[in-house]
Structures are given as C-alpha cells and as structure tokens.
Image: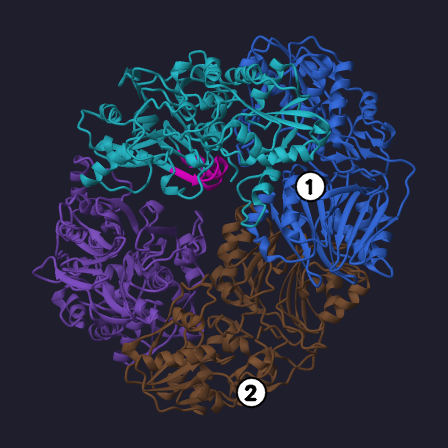
Chain colours: A blue, B brown, C purple, D cyan
C-alpha cells in the first residue's frame, strides 16, 4: 500500500430516533475516511439487538444487507480502518454479546493499552475470546463486574482500562457513552429532533441535520434512557491529551474537533509553517486532498500563489493488486498525476501534512520534476514523526518511520528535493491554542498514559 | 418448507494427515445430508488454528474460500442443518476460541439438554456469549475448568453436560474426541495411512479411502497427539441410547451406524413392516430417496413388485421462495413427479420412512391418484412420531406432529388414502438386534436423559 | 469431468398465460436435466421483449434476477448443456434480436448441420455474428428472408436448414413453434387454462398442471396469436428419425417422449437386455439414477433380485476442481458409494444405460469389487456407441468412444469385469415399437440427414 | 441522481505492447471519469480476439475477471457513462463480432447522428441487431461494405456516418483508428517503447509512461500493423468542431485536449469570468472538484482569496437508493459539506463549471447560507446551457435545462442567491484561442453537422 497513516475508527450512536439504521449508515458515510476496512451497525427494537457487518466500505454494507429490514429506536455504527493481514469479519464492529446484563453491543474508537494484561488475567479466570479486538476484552470486564446495573458495571469496568477509548454501548433499552480521561479521540453529541446522536466527528451531524451540542468530556460517562440523559464523571486525569494528529490528518476539515474547527487549526499550521520554513518558490501546491487546507494557509502567509499541481484520481480503490516490479511507483501514478501546465519551469513548494515512510513523496517528487518543475521544495505541516503511537493510530513499525533514523537533511536527500522543512513541535502546539492539552507523543516521545508492557501493536478498538 | 425432519449435524476430524483441508471438505461432501445450512473447517498448522465457514452447502464453502491457502496437519469440519430463521454465520461451526489453554476449535453434533442452566450460571459468573449455540457454552466450561491440561479440562467439563454430544476438538497440537455416555449420535474412527480420521458416518471414510477401525464408545474420550492415540472412559451410563432415527432416516444407507450396516437395518424394517402391515396391492413404490431401502425390503418380503413410481428432481434447491397460494403444493410438485405409466390402474403401496406433519404425503397421495393409481396404501417404516426430540433432531413443535393428536385412522383419512400402516415400536426395535440399546423417545416417550427445565428448542451443537 | 454424455438443451414456451416468467422458470426446473450450463427466459408484455440469462442452474437464474419484475403474456425459456470451454453468457439462450420484423427471441434445441455453410454465405453477404451459436444464424436467415410477415419468414427460413431443431420464437405479440421434418428432438404442446404451453418434455407440463395435448409433428409449424393456434406443415421428409437416445438416457422417465412413456420403453430395454444377455448373478443393481428403470426391467425379466448397490450423492455439483492426481477416481467416489452390506460376497449384475468412454464404469467396477462383490457383470441397456452425433448430443470425439476402437471383449477386459453385454441394435429398436422411425446413427452409423462438410462439433442450438 | 452532465465514454488502444490487458485496464483507470457505467477490454493474441466486460467501474472489471489469463499483443479498452435505465451488459463495449473480415472488436466514443436511418435501412436489408448501440450499426456497415480488405472497408463505412466518432478497432493482427472530420471528441496517440497507444485523453499516457506524439487529426484514419503505422485522410470537413465542453467539464485538467492544456484553458475561463462578471465578495470557493481550476483563475484575476468552502465526500458511490422524501437534498449533503469556519460571515463567490438543471446548486446555495455565508454569488465558467447535444454528451431533455426557459435573473431567483453571472459565449471561445474551431451548440444552437431526423437521444458509441 501507499505509505499513508492508516485511519483509526469512527463511531456513531443514535437514541430515540426515527429511521435509525438509515441514519446510522448515512452518518457512517460521513465518517468513512476514519476506516475503510469494515462497516457495521447494531440496532435495538427495545426487545432485541441485531447486528450486521461487512468487510469493506459502507456501500458494501448497504449492498449486502437490506437495511429496511431493521427496525429500532436506538443503534450504533462503526467503521474500521484497513490493515493488510489480520482483518476479518470477526474483528469488525459493533460487537454484540449476551451476558448477565442481557444483550450489549459496543462500538469503540481507541486503543486499550493494558488489554493484553487484562486478557491474560481473564483467560486465567476461565474466559474465552473469539476475536483479537480489545473491545471484546472490555465486554468481558463489564460482564464480570459486580454492580447493581449495567450502567454501573460499565463505569466500574472502564476505570480499569488505560489508553484511549471512545465507547458507545447499547443495551436493549439504553445507550451508554464514555470517553477516556485524557480525551485522546474526539467524540461529540448532538440533538436530532427528539433523538440524541453521538459521533466521532461533527461532519456526521451536518449530514444528518443534527445540531451539535457539545463534546463528550474526557472522563465523562453518559447514560441515555427513555427518561433522558444523565451525565457523570468516572475519572479525572491530571492532564488532557487530545491527539494532535486529528488536526493534522485524520479528521475532516469540516468537523469541529476538540471544540475547534479542524479547518482553522490546519490552516494555522500552514501559516505557521510558512513563517518557520519560508521558501523562494513560484507556486505552492498540495498533495491532495488532506494537505490542501494547510497548503492554502502556507500560500496565504507566504504570498506565493496556490495552484492545483497534482490531480488525484478518486476512482482508484483497493482492487489493484500486482506483485510485479515498479508496483509502488505505478500505484502512486494511479493515484496522482502532475499537471504539466502548472508545474513547467516553476519552482514548486509542495505542502504535505506529514511524512511517515516517505516513499510516496519520493515518487511524487520525481514525478513533479519530470513534469517540468525547476525546483521541488517540500514543506511538512507537522514535525518529524519519529515515535510509535499506542493510542489508536496505525503507524508502521518505528524502524520504518523516515524520521526515526534520518535527519531532515538526509530525508531531503532521500527524496531528491531542493529543500525540506518541517513545522516545529512548539509551532504546531501553538496553533492549537492550548498546546499542553494535546498528545504529540509521535513527535516528542512524551506518552501521557501507560503504553503496555511490550510494544504491543496498536489496534483500533 | 416441506415437512421433513431437519437433519442434525455432521462432524469430521483428521489428525496427522496430508492435504487435510482438502480431505475434510471431501468428507463433508459425504456428510452433507446431515446438514445443509452451513459448512466450515478449522485447521492447525502446529502453531495457529484458522477457521473458515460459509452459509450453505460445502460447494459454497469451497467457492468462497480458497482451501489451498490452508496448510496444516490437523483439522476438523462441520456441516449444520437448515432452519428457517435463527441461522446465521455466527452460529456456524467449527467455533474457534482462545483461552487459558490456548486456541481451541470444536465441531459438535448433538444437543446439550442442560445448556440453558449452565449458561445462566456462567452469565452470573461474568461470562459473555456471542452465539446461541450450546457448543459455545461447552467451550466456556472447558475454559473455566481447573485442570492440569486441556485434555483433563475437556474431560472434566463434559461430565457436567447432559444430553447428546459427539465432539471433536483441536488445539494447536492435539485432537480430542468425546461421545456422550448414552451414545445417542454415531461417531467412528478410521485409519488413513498414518493419519487418524473420525467422522459421524463411515461413508466419509469410504470416500477418503480411510479404513474403519471401530466406533468411538459411548463415554469414551480420545486424546490424539504426536505420541499416538490414548483412550479412556470419562463416564458410564446404566444404559445405551442410540438414536434409532439414524437408521430410519438420518444416516446414509451405505454407512455403518452403531456398528451395523444402516442399509441392512433399514431393509429389515421394510420387511418387518410387510409382516406387520400387509397390503393387497399391485406394486410397491417408495418416496425417494430415503424410503427406497425400506421399500425394497417391503417388496421383497411381500412378494409385490417394486417400482419407481415417483421421480425426484435433485436440482431443486432452496432458492425458490414464493409467498403466494398453492406454494406448498407446487414445492412438492417441483420435487416429485409421478410416473403415470407405472401407476395407472394400479393399486399402489407407498412406503415412506416416517410421518412428521403429513402435509407432503397428503399432496403426494393426491398426485398418485391423479396419475391413475386405483388405490393408495401408505406404509410407514417406523412407528407414529408423537413426541419431541431433545437429543439432536429438529422436529416441529409437538402440536404439529400428525401422530400427537390423530390416530392412524384419522391420519389415513386426512391423507385421503385407502389404508395406512405403521411399524410397531417392538417390531422396529427388534430389527436393530438389541432394541433396549436405542432411544426411541419420539415414538414411546421414554427419554433416557435429562431433557431440560423447559421444553427448550433442540439445537444442533 | 465424468464421462457422461452431455445433455442437450431444453425449451419451453407459454402463450397467453398468467405469471408467465414464474411458470417458465418452474418449467425449466423440470427440464434442468437437459442442460445445466446456462438458463434464461424472454418475456413479451405485448409491446417489448426482455431477456435475462445466467450461467449455471435455474436456481442461479432465480437468484440473479428478480423474476417478479417481469410482466408479460408470452415468454420462452431455455436450459443449455454444460461444456468445458466455449461456454459463455453470450451463447446462452434465449437470444433476442431486433430486425425488420421487430423484436424476436428464440429458444432452440437441436443442431443445425449446415450452419457453417450458411454462416459463410451470410458473412459474404455482410452479416456480423456475435455468438458461435447456430441459433444466431437462424435468426439472420429469418431477418433476411423476403416475406409478407414474420411467420412466413420463419417458415421460409427453416426450410433451408438441415439437421435437428425444435424452435420456439416469440415476437412482441405472437409465438411460433417449429420442429424439423425428421422429428429428431421431442417437443409437445399442452393447455394450461386459457394458455398454450410447449416444452421439450411433458414432465414440465405435469409440474405446471398443464394438460398434454399432443406432440408437435415433425415438419409442423405453429402460429399462436391472440386469434388462436394455426398449424401447418412446412416440410415433409421421407422418414422419421426420433433420437433413440432420448429413451436411453436424456429424457426423464416420467416424460412422454415421441408419444410413448419414456419409462415404459426404458424398462422394455432392460427386459430385452435380460433376454439377450442373461447372467448368472445374485443381484441386479443400477448405476443411479439414469439406469435404474432399465435395471428394474432387467431384474424383473431375469428374476434376479433388484438392489440399491450404489448410493449417489446429489450434493456434488461442479465446484470441485483439482488438478492433482487421482482426481477422476475421487470424483467418481464423491458421486457414488457402494453399499457393502448389499454387495459383499455377491455376484453382481450392474445395469448401465450406455458406455461412452468407459472411464467411470472402470472405476465403479473396482469400487464394487473392493466392496466385496465376488463377480461384476456389466449389462448395457443400449448398443455400443461407436459414432458421433450431429443432431444435438455432445459426444466426446469419436476416438474417445470406447466402442470405436475396442470390441466388447476388449472393453470388458479394460473394465476388469467378468462379463459385459450390450443390447443389440435390433433389440433396442424393437422396444420402441416402430424402430424404423428412430435415428440410431451413433450405434449403426446410419445418418438420416446431412451432417456437415467437415465433422463440425455438434452444438446445442 | 444529481443534476450532473453524464460523462461520455473513454477509449484506449495499445498495439505491439507488453502486458497489454494490464496496461489497458490501468489506462482505463485514468479515463474512468469519462464513464462509470461499464468497463471492458478486447485483446488479440494474433489468432483470436477475446472480450470481457463488466457493469460498473474498472475496479469491478478487475474483480470479475482475472486479467492475467489474457495474453495478447494488441487490445482496446472502453469505459461507458452511466445512465439510469437502458444500461445493460449487452450495450457495454468493446463489441466483438465475427464477419467476412474475420473477428473485429471496436471501442467507440461519440454519437452517430444518422444511426437510426442507417439501422432502418440495414433492417430492411435483413440485418439483425442485438444491442441498441450505434457501434453495432457501424460494425454492420463495415461488414457489408465491398472492399479489398478490412481497412478499406472501415474507411468506406465511416464516410457514411454523420456525427461524432473516435473509433479504435482491432482485428486479429491489426489496429485501426479513426476520428470524425469535425474532431468533436479528443483522441491522441503516443509511443510506449515499441508499442503504439491511442487514448481519449493524454492523462492515460502519463499513467502508462507513454510519450504523447500528437492528436489524431480530424478526418484521419490510421492503420497500424506489424509493418508500422500508416496515416491517411478519409474525409475533409470545411470546419472543425471540437467539443468545448471537454474543456469546461469532461476532460481531466491534467490532460492535453485538442493540443492544448485543459488546465490552462479552464483557468483562462475562470479569469475571463472574473473580468466579465466581477463580484464584491470576501472569498472565492468552488464546487469541487470540477470547478476548482476555474475558481483558482477567478480568484487570481479578481484578487479575492480562494478558499475550500465545500468538502466533497469521495466515498459516496451509486449504492444509496431511497425513494423517500428529501432524497435529493440528502444526496447533495452526502456528497458535499460546507466548512463553517471558512464561510461564516463571509460574502461568498461560488464558481461552478456549468448549470444544467440547477437543482444541486439550489441546495448547495441554501447549505452555504445555513453555514453562515452572508451573501452567495454564483459565477458560472461557461454560458447558459440551453440546447441539447447530439454529439456525445448525455444532457437531460431540453425542457429540464434551466437556461432553456429561464433568464439568468430568474435562475438566480430560483437558486435564492444574491447574484448569478455566466461567462459569455464570445469570452469562452476567446479563451480557447481559435474559437471558430469549436462546437458550442449547447450554448449557441449552432450545430456543425446533421443531428438526426428526430431528436434522437444522444448515446455514447
């Protein structure tokens, strides 16, 4: 595959709504960028919960299941990111189980960092596991917790978990929502007529015509029943740790993330980048689509003209598989084509959101030069990614991260470009307003929470 | 659907073999008559177990999965019967779980009668359930049993279960086989070169070129490892209770069942039926294919000529769905067509294996008469089915059983035939040799084991 | 594949009926044994004809297309035999074209022997061909014929064709039916309420509750319109040439073929075989299912007991593909299993309908012996197949026909059996009543019509 | 569907290449924007041509067919646009036929305006038609033309056709390429090592690493054989008539179209629009992605800042079907979401490429206002579309074109916007350099060629 970051997951939940499955799947379309490996929904009609999942996109889910057959008043949905090997339908979400609390379905975005220890303990206690998902571990913990009711059991269970989690549960009659105390991943709530809607990103609300109310607070636990919504705090951490990569790459620019417009932050990062790493160039282009907002900011701050220099082909899916030579190059070419008329005889400043391995950017740089660019200057709207993430991003192993073994100069040389500039960690944090509230561990190696006994592979819940 | 008995399940296991997945799926073809709802296999390569399942026939399993991708030295396979609603991939087998004993996969034929009680107890203890299959309950019990090793845990666990079970487990390096103490369902073992093979019916051995060794004994527990096969007895019941319906309908006539040739017993039943219920008719025909062996026996004993009077269309699958009127009749017609030349102006004796609801036979009787039969005499090669089964057969509810509310005379009248004769319970048992070793509860209401607190739906393991 | 004769095709047409597509597909179920490669229907609503086809069985056609979407008052259906390579959807039928006569759809059973010459002539005249089917050639001829109307054009066109054809056409408002002057293939007509129904075999009528009226006569041309049915003769040959193989193997025994009960003729052949080739054996068994009727006749005439000695597995479809060794043997084993209890220590007489290559029978003979048969005597209810068919059967090439290069004794030796007996050509013809009305060219090399300039591959229309 | 113009078709051909099918399908990915209804290829191995097609995208074609099975040295490919009803696999391309010239396959982009007349004539002459495609008519004409060889036949045939056509043919050993005398649709040729490659747009060459040589000339006919390439002129029109809509909307901006950079022309149109229709606004946004280049030009010329104000969701395919209310609005919302942070309290100038019905723009305008835009000013980078196209674009019927019945002011009112401005016809033509060489009939009602006896539906070849 191309050397992109894998997306995380996206979750949505609707309580007391009409056309619930239809609206959940609509909402999943808006969250599709957060996960393309599998999609699914669970729906309660007040008596029984049913679940349906498909490998692939939301469009596959809709093709494989007749959503009109699923009536209900409350439901949850999930999209999961794409990985190469371990992806199976068994690991798709929502997960539906039956236990002493009755039926429970859960949709999870995040990564539980003490999942392995808890699973080992549960296995010793006689539990069985049918998936490799940390969400199943979570459900075991809830099922074996002593409590007066399901809500209390969830609350008690999640205090045992470290790492990141945005969770939406449904029982046959209620919905429960929880967000870890650091607030790693985004989760918001909205009103949609008489219904409540929670979702990973507010762009889902826009699509559904739901009105954004507020973010679920870090450490907040919501109980939504026929009697209304009840909020309480189940944990209090001494700091916040919003994932700053949500602004850089993951979230859609039209979403409000961590109570700020993602578009605005991303643009500020572009402007800050222009200030920190100026360039003597004729045009500014972006690697579409994720870096376009930052590129516009860079262009505006630098006064250099913004142009569309690379065309992205959106028809290229994951069908094309070929083990022969030059495949990586051809894949990049399938996805991007330079516009000669824009680039020819120009000194080009290319704004990209981040560098992971750098392999795509190396091919793109050559393509730009072949298209007539006189000079190629790369500007990255984030600092060098040098450390793994344990809180929900699917990075390649640390050794594969370009910045873990190379200096920016060495990377520039590897890319074959005239210059390479990164945004500074300080500059990046400044753009977010209150930088101390963010997790930037992949840049600065400062992990806010337990990261597991061994460097366990980060997995989306 | 037609008013047939639903099949149960079929299991197969191969240890230390070559082309294991290929041979398992071949064997499942031979067991396909025991279940058409889903098919699956699990395979261990010594390090890891993988599982694949499909809804539908073995041919669907082969189409949906490339079996050549699955290497391993030990594996199990399963076919599951067809029910109307609750059938989902989640309930298909084998079930693969991970627990303190590592990975375990199981294939089960039978019905655990105290599953509900055990599940309630486990839920109270904090367990979660992802299927409605009693096999999952079994795995929970194994996972929470205190023991020195997996083999001992299985042995201890299965002593807690009542009802019928033929079980084949694989761990990453071993295979375990168990059969309940009553011996309800058939299970045999064979040698295939250096490999061991266990299967529900010996016809699978014939197909694989494996040499039948013996039946797994009721109450026997086998441990098969690289060091060889170890047998022990985990329970001893005060009687045997082989399902006599295996002879009447379920098993293939070419299988050796309960150490006797199914074909021979079935033929004896036909002969005995001729003795008990003679008829003055010109020809004997069967309802193909299941009743043909009994019909041949009837013809032989009565001296009346055997004929093929009904042609069965084997191309009719489960595709044809239509909610309009006359559907049941058209379905019967799709499946069977009378041969006029055989039937015209003849007094016809029709041998059928059993009557469940009687709806198909009613339609068939009319079709025979329309085809010119002067008289229609029905002879059933088993006694009236009047009681539910809790040990692995999927009967309709008791109220729907023709014989639960009607006398044979009333049934004859309902069918619109000249006469109706059933085999007697005593006659039937006599045909098996040692009749006291068989469960005939669906005929005589004598249940050999606990049948559950409520009349729980019988479900294949 | 196994060395069976490939089926030909089956056609059906309904005019002025209700639920036309539904009834056509039902009827195709009854004709499924005549072709499993593809299935299709064409339907006219009085204004426009629509066509749908699928590769595979009728059940696939029903799964891939929602037949309820197709309203109409007249339609035709077709099932096509299975060949290994050249089978594509483009060649599936019905074929629908538009021409000066408007839309025409055709379903064809047979083989046009001068198709190549006509096609060459048409190509020279500027026609284009999109299939390799002779039915397309037929439609070209109709389209380019000078006539007053479509009916006349069809009549004129078909007089130019040699070989075998049973044709059912629909235009937007009419149906046309034609059968070649030799009457090679069967075609009958029935009444179904106010509707007319034509079909290759009468078993389709039975399923639909239609009342058989008569056979379409050799050389007859029917025009069916809103004004009723009009019959005329378009050709008169100096002899008839019904395909005798329809009785031996192709047709269902419950069908009336060439105005006689197929079952009766097939049984007579078995009796005649017993007279011509007696055997000293303990039991008579058949190779199920096609030879069972003849085996019953043989048993009756010989006084030797009929038994079910081979069980056929009807679940084995065409999914199983494997290039490794022993495949042919395993395929035979997948399909047939000997019943040891029946065969052990018996001298067995096996009745088969015909020998093509003999490869299956060779494997079966060994299987019977391995199952304990003391002696194996093969009796074939037809003469040695030594010559190709050009009138609609798909034989292997002449060189592969066992009887083209071996004497019966040599074949017996190849099969490894104690004895082998064939029915004589005279005996076979006698069983049909008026033997001179039948084509037995594959046995006696006497071709009633032109067979083409080169030994063109026979292809179903 | 949304009120977009339907794309036309895209064609590609490769002669004397390696990995021909692979490269053809790669090239089709680059041409995918020209047609999403069906995709296909035909390939010759020097002896035989084979064809494979699928409904849907190129990714579906690759999923349904194993392209590695298709060897050959010359091939053609085609993508076809999406229409609602009449789209069937039968109409997909390439079309492969057999005729007196042997096998011929064709891929066609364009619309033959005298197809109906020619078809009527051919039907009268006895031809049959299996599709409703004008490409089939073309093949009939070639097949019935008297000539010395295929090349001459094609040349003679195409002189009889009016309208637009870019044609790529292969026979078993040669390739033929033709472009109508007006040059309506783009078609270029490139070298790829020893191979020749022709394609509708040069972006396919970029992807394949082929070097653009030149455009196929209007009225040019190319014969490509093992002996090389031969060019000749088969017709000479008194004017050129390049489709100006290729610049406005159809072609990819990175393609060289009619020997000019599409991106450059599109940008000029944006600049010209700014000159003709200035606006007093705070930001310029585009309706992504097709209008972005023009919007950049507008922003540059006007000095108003360019912003990304609408986010496009590229995951939305054609799966979502719902007959309930508000569907159109929800579809627009699924596809586009406004970015509040960009729009709030801004006077927004929205640049769109064209207005067809105006329904999408009406919904978008309301969405922008709901997102906080103070004023919405629409600027269209082309003149009002008021007349149908007969040369290869799939417009709605004239009555549905907003500009056919409303003045710009009325349209602005319908859209509910502060102002609406169109580019003038003169301004548009000026941007192309030599405006007289272009067809702008949909704007100015000046049709350069025969448009058919009746207003026949324009259809892609």
Q: Which sits in the foreground, A47 or B1? A: A47
Q: Which sits in the foreground, B339 or A286? A: A286
| Residue B193 is one of the magenta-drawn residues | no
The answer to whether residue B137 is left or right of residue A184 is left
Q: Vertical placement of A291 versus A109: above or below?
A: above
Q: Which sits in the foreground, A167 or B145? A: A167
**Residue C140 placement (x, y as % from top left):** 21, 44
Which residues are the magenta region?
Answer: D52-70
In this rendering, do the residues under marks 1 and 2 share a single chain? no
| Residue D58 is one of the magenta-drawn residues | yes
Q: How far apart are marks 1 and 2 (CA)?
A: 59 Å
Q: Name the residue under label 1.
A: A204
**Residue C332 placement (x, y as % from top left):** 40, 59
The answer to whether residue D227 is left or right of residue B248 is left
Q: Vertical placement of A14 versus A400: above or below?
A: below
Chain to which the residue tagged by mark 1 belongs: A
**Residue D205 placement (x, y as % from top left):** 46, 21
Which residue sits at x=33%, y=37%? D133
The disc label shown at residue B405, or none: 2
Which element is circle 1 on? helix
> Tag 1: Cα neighbours inside 10 Å, few (<14), some, or many (≥20)?
many
The answer to whether residue D427 is left or right of residue A291 is left
**Residue C25 placement (x, y as % from top left):** 37, 60
Q: Which sits in the foreground, D99 or A278? A: A278
């Amino acid at each position: 595959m191309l050397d992109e970051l894998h997306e995380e997951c996206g979750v949505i939940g609707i309580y007391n709504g009409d056309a619930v499955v239809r609206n959940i799947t609509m909402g999943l379309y808006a969250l599709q960028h957060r996960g393309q490996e599998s999609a699914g929904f669970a729906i309660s009609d007040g008596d029984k919960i049913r679940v349906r999942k498909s490998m692939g996109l939301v469009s596959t889910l809709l093709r494989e299941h007749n959503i009109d057959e699923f009536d209900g008043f409350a439901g949850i949905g999930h999209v999961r990111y794409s990985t190469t090997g371990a992806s199976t339908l068994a690991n798709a979400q929502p997960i539906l189980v039956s236990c002493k609390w009755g039926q429970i379905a859960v949709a999870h975005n995040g990564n539980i960092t003490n999942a392995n220890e808890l699973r080992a303990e549960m296995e010793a206690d006689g539990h069985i596991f049918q998936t490799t998902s940390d969400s199943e571990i979570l459900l075991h913990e809830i099922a074996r917790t002593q409590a007066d009711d399901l809500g209390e059991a969830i609350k008690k269970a999640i205090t045992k978990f470290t790492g990141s989690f945005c969770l939406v549960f449904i029982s046959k009659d209620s919905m429960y929502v929880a967000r870890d105390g650091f607030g790693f991943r985004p989760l918001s709530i909205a009103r949609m007529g008489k219904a409540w809607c929670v979702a990973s990103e507010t762009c889902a609300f826009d699509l559904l015509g739901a009105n954004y109310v507020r973010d679920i607070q870090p450490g907040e636990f919501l109980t939504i029943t026929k009697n209304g919504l009840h909020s309480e705090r189940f944990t209090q951490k001494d700091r916040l740790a919003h994932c700053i990569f949500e602004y850089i790459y993951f979230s859609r620019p039209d979403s409000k993330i961590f109570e700020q417009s993602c578009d605005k932050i991303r643009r500020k990062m572009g402007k800050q980048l222009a200030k920190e790493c100026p360039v003597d160039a004729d045009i500014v282009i972006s690697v579409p689509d994720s870096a376009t907002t930052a590129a516009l900011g860079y262009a505006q701050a630098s006064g250099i003209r913004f142009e569309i220099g690379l065309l992205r082909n959106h028809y290229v899916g994951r069908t094309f598989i070929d083990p022969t030579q030059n495949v990586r190059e051809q894949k990049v070419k399938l996805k991007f084509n330079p516009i000669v008329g824009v680039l020819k005889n120009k000194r080009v400043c290319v704004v990209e959101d981040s560098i992971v391995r750098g392999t795509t950017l190396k091919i793109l740089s050559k393509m730009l030069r072949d298209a007539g660019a006189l000079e190629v200057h790369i500007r990255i709207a984030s600092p060098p990614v040098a450390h793994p993430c344990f809180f929900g991003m699917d990075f390649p192993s640390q050794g594969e991260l370009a910045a873990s073994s190379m200096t920016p100069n060495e990377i520039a040389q590897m890319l074959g470009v005239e210059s390479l500039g990164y945004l500074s960690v300080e500059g990046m944090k400044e753009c977010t307003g209150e930088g101390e509230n963010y997790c930037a561990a992949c840049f600065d190696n400062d992990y806010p929470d337990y990261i597991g006994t061994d460097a366990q592979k980060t997995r989306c819940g």
